[in-house]
């Protein structure tokens, strides 16, 4: 294999796929991408051929397949350590923040799915979802260093994990603090993300939209 292949889901829907895609791009690692449309008859069979998890994303490398978005991002960071903050303390906090997003905020995920083909409109949300929104804003305010536009100054894997959240906040017209809104716009204005977004808008696969 001359270079890795990133197997991803629909760009309009797959938050898990967006994160390692951004990370690979930011690292400058050349890779091929293969889109496996979600919720199709053959989707599960195709995914099982790539990993026992039968989920996207999967990074196919010369030494084996890696599944799970955070595991893939950590593999990328081994090739490009600058994807985490240089300072050991900040690096530990960045990993904690990233892990919080990786495993938490279930109400937000369930009620406000990423959908880059949905025109921005507000949506009724539960108390639990509003609580997740407040927690995320508090988390950003707590860790943001102020030394640059991203959470830890320069772009990091932590920003990759919150980019899908930024899309949700925009899509569902979520009211945010001034600081949180500025961070959302920073993530969505990033040229690498904008390439993903443009491709997502062109997708034509049938999928469950919300």
Image (cartoon, rainbow, N blue to C red):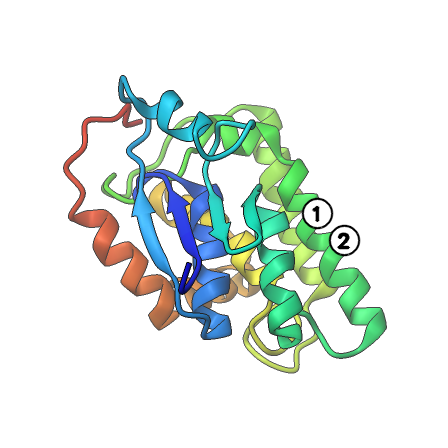
Locate residue 203, reporting x and y percent. Answer: 18, 43
Q: Nearer the viewer, residue 77 or 166?
A: 77
The residue to which callout 2 is attached is 96
Q: Nearer the viewer, residue 89 or 43?
A: 43
Locate residue 1, reporting x and y percent. Answer: 42, 58
| Cα gap from disc 2 to disc 1, whole angstroms | 5 Å
The residue to which callout 1 is attached is 99
Q: Is residue 108 left or right of residue 34?
A: right
Q: Secondary structure at mark 2?
A: helix
Residue 195 visible to the viewer = yes
**Residue at horizontal 55 percent and vertical 59 percent from the top:** 180
Cβ–Cβ under 8 Å for marks 2 and 1: yes
Q: Residues within 10 Å of mark 1 (few under 14, many from 20)?
A: some
Q: Secondary structure at mark 1?
A: helix
Q: Is residue 134 left or right of residue 43?
A: right
Q: Is residue 70 left or right of residue 166?
A: right
Q: Is residue 119 above or below residue 192?
A: above
Q: Residues within 10 Å of mark 2 (few under 14, many from 20)?
A: few
Locate residue 196, reporting x and y percent. Answer: 31, 57
Name, please, the residue furthest toward the right. Answer: 89
Q: Quadrant of residue 148?
A: bottom right
Marks counted in the figure total 2
**Res 3 label:** none
């Amino acid at each position: 294999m001359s270079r890795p292949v990133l197997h991803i889901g629909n760009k309009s829907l797959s938050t898990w796929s967006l994160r390692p895609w951004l990370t690979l791009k930011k690292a400058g690692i050349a890779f091929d991408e293969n889109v496996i449309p979600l919720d199709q008859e053959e989707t599960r069979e195709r995914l099982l051929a790539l990993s026992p998890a039968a989920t996207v994303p999967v990074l196919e490398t010369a030494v084996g397949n890696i599944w799970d978005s955070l595991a893939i991002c950590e593999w990328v960071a081994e090739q490009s350590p600058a994807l985490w903050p240089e300072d050991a303390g900040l690096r530990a906090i960045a990993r904690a923040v990233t892990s919080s997003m990786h495993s938490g905020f279930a109400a937000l995920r369930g009620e406000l799915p990423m959908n880059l083909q949905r025109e921005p409109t507000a949506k009724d949300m539960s108390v639990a979802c509003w609580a997740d929104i407040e927690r995320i804003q508090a988390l950003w305010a707590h860790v943001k260093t102020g030394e640059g536009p991203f959470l830890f100054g320069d772009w990091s894997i932590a920003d990759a994990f919150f980019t899908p959240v930024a899309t949700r906040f925009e899509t569902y017209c979520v009211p945010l603090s001034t600081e949180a809104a500025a961070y959302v716009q920073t993530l969505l204005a990033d040229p690498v993300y904008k390439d993903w977004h443009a491709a997502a808008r062109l997708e034509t696969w049938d999928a469950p939209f919300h």
